[in-house]
Amino acid sequence: LGTAGAAGAAGAAGLIAGGAAGAGVAAAVDAEPTALATVGSAHIPFEGARQAGIVQPAQARGHLVAFDLVAGADRKAAAGLMRRWSDAVRTMTAADRPAAPAAYDDQVAYDAGPSSLTVTFGFGRSFFGRTGLGAALPEALAPLPDFPGDRLDAGRSNGDLWVQVGADDALVAFHALRVLQKVARDTASLRWQMSGFNRTPGATPHPMTGRNLMGQIDGTNNPKPADPDFERRIFVPAKGSPEWMAGGSYAVVRRIRMLLDDWDHLPVARQEKVIGRRKSDGAPLSGGTEFTPVDLGKVHADGSLAIAGDAHIRVAAAASNEGAAMLRRAFSYHDGIGADGTPDAGLLFVAWQADPLKGFVPVQRKLDGGDGLSRFLRHESSGLFAVPGGAGKGEYVGQRLLE
Ligand code: HEM
């Protein structure tokens, strides 16, 4: 599930600022720019009304990580951590590298520009109890229901704090993650980590929607920032509840294993029926090209539905779910071969919405059981996080909750 529009479309909707990279790459920039220099110099500002890493195209590399506060770490300790994390990310995402690396900087990414690095922070339900902030717990952080098809590993689910790192360079992404871990020492320890990837910008002749590991073009019918109701559906409004979540969003994170050996045995025509779109170009089976609106009512001359009753796009569609909408922004993962000898691979599914009870929950209820695709998937871990609005100049993420 790529993001709205084309993965890697640097500059899409003016969200990514290209610019001078750090001093170390200036010499290369003098020459005719190469694709590589362009990837390194793209930078996404850390400060803003919303956190970065939600509406921008998903980067080529991603790490999803959860931390738990260590015993005894209270609200003040958590505020200190969010301050240190925010300052570190401000430095790492800047267009210009500081004159001297910070003490915690291992210099793994020393030669690279920011490479579209984003770091997004969220709070899990357990965070509020541990910090004595129960009164500020958003209703929307109610635990997700148990879905009958779930096969969840509690050790790789939930967590006090959630961090999403994305960058178009693997070393830049690793470096950001290490810095965050080092800065967290004594306050929070790592609970789980998942690493993923997407297509690298520049790998295709022109920017286009990405593909997942089943081979499908994925992300076509995502809400687009230009949609009139985009803001309302994806972000908590300025006067929303609780107030500290204004400009924020809720992230549902699911590690979804793809049963690829079973899937790959299906003839392409059957695979297309399961999704409701053509594999080659993502066009809906009701006709047209990738972005032609889906016609769920279309029937063939023999009376059969063009888009099958259990096709993924029919069951998941907003039209089938009272307008439920979410922005899917995922990374693929591949962690080698599982105990059963099949690829341990699939999707690190991240869905963004203003209210999970009007986004992920009703859609997953329908999908779990009614979706032809569910026979080829296994939900192995789950998390729900409140992702506050972005930090202004000199602020840290979550300041309105923690100060
Ligand atoms: C659409 C694949 C899981 C919600 C799609 C499409 C593909 C796809 C190929 C069509 C292209 C597009 O519009 O993006 C997958 C795969 C999954 C997965 C491989 C798991 C590994 C989920 C889950 C949800 C979801 C868990 C939500 C609970 C949607 C929605 C659409 C969609 C809302 C757009 C439907 C429409 O309005 O046309 N998915 N999906 N998907 N999927 Fe999934």
Image: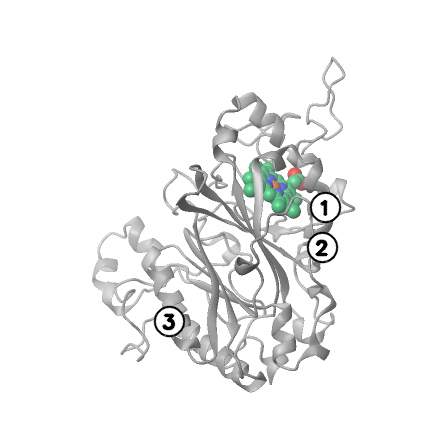
**Colour setting:** one colour
Task: Tell me what residue is drawn at x 37 percent, y 45 percent.
Answer: 202
Q: Quadrant of residue 382?
A: bottom right
Where residue 325 sits: x, y (%)?
69, 50
Of 37 and 161, nearer the camera is 161
Q: Nearer the viewer, mark 2 or mark 1?
A: 2
Q: Amino acid at mark 1?
A: Arg
Q: Quadrant of residue 311?
A: top right
Say how many tags the image has: 3
Q: Is residue 60 left or right of residue 35?
A: right
- Residue annotated with mark 2: 145
- Pointers 2 and 1 in contact (C-beta within 8 Å): yes
Report the disc number at residue 179. 3
Q: Earlier in the sequence, mark 1 or mark 3?
A: 3
- Residue annotated with mark 1: 365
Task: Tell me what residue is drawn at x 76 percent, y 40 percent.
Answer: 320
Task: Tell me what residue is drawn at x 41 percent, y 51 percent.
Answer: 60
User: Is residue 220 at all visible to an observer of this figure?
Assistant: no
Look at the numbered disc 1 and give the secondary structure of its residue.
Answer: helix
Report the disc number at residue 403. none
Where residue 393 sits: x, y (%)?
51, 79
Q: Quadrant of ligand 1?
A: top right
Task: Tell me what residue is drawn at x 72 percent, y 44 percent.
Answer: 318
- Compared with residue 177, is residue 302 higher up or lower down, i.e. above or below? above
Q: Is residue 29 left or right of residue 340?
A: left
Q: Amino acid at mark 2?
A: Pro
- Compared with residue 49, is residue 32 higher up or lower down, i.e. above or below? above
